[in-house]
């Protein structure tokens, strides 16, 4: 019988030739070696697939589809996975060599768990990284977190490159939603964490490149993200943490709408935002004229280039 790997690493790729080799090398360099790599090419028009094929590694299996978006490509990749546990990584992010070992440590420590994540850092420029800050204090190396929403008011405890799960959990939660083109990750994390607690590892093992995303146009980004905001209204009524978490997401999308001069979406979202959940800076940003907010965003990006990190979320 063919060997069933402990982990399947699922990677959806769309036009990532600038980063894909470094990403793949970080995956193949894991110090835990019982894994396969399942790549789905989502209709790339650059050299991404050529570069992956040139790596000539027996762990790698490649599948292709016409461009359907990240959700469909991830679902396709996971459907092709044969491992007991599925780990995701975006095609422009990085793992340390101990990432899968840390996930395995979580599995051994919490054998009943079905959802796992590790601590990560955010790369704002090629030369500037900041470790993620959460709204829950984590003092142990490994811990079970029952309230994902309360811990994710600043930065999400889960990213699409630091997460792993069982196939059972993924299918029970309903997979990635192909009809959501922006915010599809958050949508899945909500459904997963409504069903399962999160096993979390405090050691940083993932680098998320925030500047390397395939950015949608501002208007499309806002309109797609807004689809998620009222999807869980019923669950919010009995889950105060989820309600506040969704309120912070409404604030974020409203700010994106204002930055994109999308007044229609901004005016639709604004009445839904509970101002009591916002800090002074966040309330001020909502009131700020679009032109001034755009200048503030440019200033923030300039500060990032100087390795200074300011955020409205603290």
Image: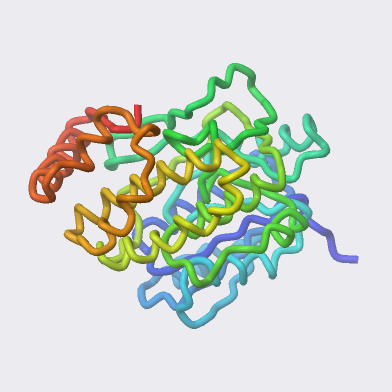
- Which image quarter is the C terminus in? top left
- Furthest toward the bottom, the residue is 66
Q: Residue at x 51, y 55 (%)?
A: 185
Percent x, y for residue 243?
Answer: 51, 42
Q: For this view, does 290 lie left or right of residue 7?
A: left
Q: For this view, does 110 lie left or right of residue 80?
A: right
Q: Residue at x 49, y 67 (%)?
A: 54
Q: Residue at x 82, y 37 (%)?
A: 111
* 97 vs 93: above or below: above
Q: Which one is nearer the viewer's eye here, 56 or 135?
A: 135
Q: Which one is nearer the viewer's eye here, 220 or 5?
A: 220
Q: Residue at x 23, y 42 (%)?
A: 286
Number of numbered discs visible in the structure rendering: 0
Percent x, y for residue 79?
Answer: 69, 69
Q: Which one is nearer the viewer's eye here, 172 or 65?
A: 172
The answer to whether residue 140 is visible is yes
- Furthest toward the right, the residue is 1
Q: For this view, does 3 lie left or right of residue 70?
A: right
The answer to whether residue 24 is visible is no
* 165 vs 279: above or below: below
- Furthest toward the top, the residue is 139
Q: Quadrant of residue 78?
A: bottom right
- Which image quarter is the N terminus in? bottom right
Percent x, y for residue 156?
Answer: 49, 39
* Rendering colour mode: rainbow
Percent x, y for residue 213?
Answer: 35, 56
């Amino acid at each position: 019988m063919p060997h069933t790997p402990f982990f399947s690493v699922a990677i959806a790729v769309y036009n990532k030739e600038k980063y894909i080799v470094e990403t793949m090398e970080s995956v193949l360099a894991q110090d835990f070696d019982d894994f396969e790599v399942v790549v789905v090419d989502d209709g790339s028009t650059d050299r991404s697939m050529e570069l992956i094929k040139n790596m000539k590694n027996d762990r790698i299996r490649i599948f292709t589809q016409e461009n359907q978006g990240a959700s469909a490509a991830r679902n396709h990749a996971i459907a092709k996975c044969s491992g007991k546990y599925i780990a995701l990584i975006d095609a422009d992010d990085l793992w340390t060599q101990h990432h899968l070992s840390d996930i395995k440590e979580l599995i051994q420590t919490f054998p009943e768990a079905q959802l796992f994540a590790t601590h990560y850092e955010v790369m704002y420029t090629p030369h500037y990284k900041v470790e993620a800050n959460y709204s829950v204090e984590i003092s142990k190396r490994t811990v079970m977190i029952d309230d994902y929403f309360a811990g994710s008011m600043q930065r999400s405890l889960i990213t699409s490159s630091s997460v792993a799960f069982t196939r059972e959990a993924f299918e029970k939660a309903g997979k990635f939603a192909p009809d959501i083109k922006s915010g599809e990750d958050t949508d899945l994390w909500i459904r997963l964490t409504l069903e399962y607690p999160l096993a979390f590892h405090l050691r940083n093992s993932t680098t998320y490149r925030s500047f390397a995303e395939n950015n949608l146009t501002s208007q499309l980004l806002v309109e797609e993200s807004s689809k998620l905001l009222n999807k869980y209204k019923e669950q919010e009524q009995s889950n105060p943490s989820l309600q506040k978490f969704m309120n912070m997401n409404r604030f974020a999308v409203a700010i994106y709408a204002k930055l994109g001069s999308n007044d229609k979406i901004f005016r639709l979202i604004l009445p839904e935002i509970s101002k009591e959940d916002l800090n002074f800076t966040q309330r001020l940003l909502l009131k700020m004229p679009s032109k001034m907010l755009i200048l503030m965003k440019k200033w923030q990006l300039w500060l990032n280039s100087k390795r200074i990190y300011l955020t409205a979320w603290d």
